[in-house]
Image: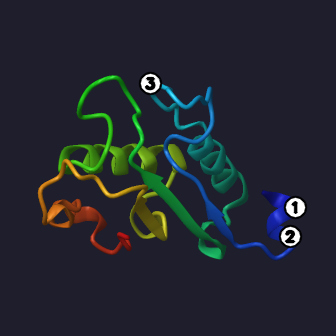
Amino acid sequence: MDAAFEAGINFFDTADVYGGPQSPDMKKGYGVSEETVGRWLQRTGRRDDIVLATKVYQPMGLGPNDRRLSAYHLRRACKASLRRLHTRGERSPSRYRGLAPDRTVVPPCWGAQPAHRRDVMWT
């Protein structure tokens, strides 16, 4: 990330499920990529110099509320991403995105966006 930033790259994209063991039939994610980005942000202090994006959707646990885009999972996933990325308040991700439409959520699902994250762009 240091080399990319020094080369002029300022957009970093991750997801809660990136990193760790990966397979098409994986049961859960591990948050490894967000933790790696979080450690880099802590070490460099460059949060204000980059655009940071992360995503939610894939399973992060074995339970029914550990996946997809239910209001419950969105709230928990957002808090967990903030913790792994070592970001809070003004320094949160620039973009937090659901990876895919969740046909199991009854519209308007975006009204469930956590109150403390209303400034995040949901797409």
Amino acid type at circle 3 is Lys
Amino acid type at circle 2 is Glu
> Eyeballing the image, is 87 above or below 47?
above
Which one is earlier in the sequence, the residue at label 1 or at label 3?
Answer: 1
Q: Is residue 13 left or right of residue 77?
A: right
Q: Position of residue 50 (x, y in %)?
A: 64, 72
Q: Secondary structure at mark 1?
A: helix
Which one is earlier in the sequence, the residue at label 2 or at label 3?
Answer: 2
Disc 2 vs disc 3: which is toward the camera?
3
Q: Please report the residue visible at 31 percent of the width from the left and 34 percent of the height from the top.
A: 66
Quadrant in which the C terminus is drawn: bottom left
Disc 2 vs disc 3: Cβ atoms closer than 8 Å?
A: no
Q: 73 or 7, which lies in front?
A: 73
Q: Secondary structure at mark 2?
A: helix
Q: Position of residue 99 (x, y in %)?
A: 43, 55
Identify residue for label 2. 6
Total residue callouts: 3
C-alpha gap between disc 2 and disc 3: 37 Å
Identify residue for label 3. 27
> Eyeballing the image, is 111 above or below 16?
below
Disc 2 vs disc 1: Cβ atoms closer than 8 Å?
A: yes
Q: Position of residue 35 (x, y in %)?
A: 59, 41
- Residue 3 — which label? 1
Q: Please report the residue visible at 86 percent of the width from the left and 70 percent of the height from the top.
A: 6
Q: Position of residue 118 (x, y in %)?
A: 27, 71
Q: Is residue 106 left or right of residue 60?
A: left
Quadrant in which the N terminus is drawn: bottom right
Q: Mark 3: give few (<14), some (14-19) or many (20+) Cα within 10 Å.
A: few
Disc 1 vs disc 3: Cβ atoms closer than 8 Å?
A: no
Q: 72 or 89, which lies in front?
A: 72
C-alpha gap between disc 2 and disc 1: 5 Å
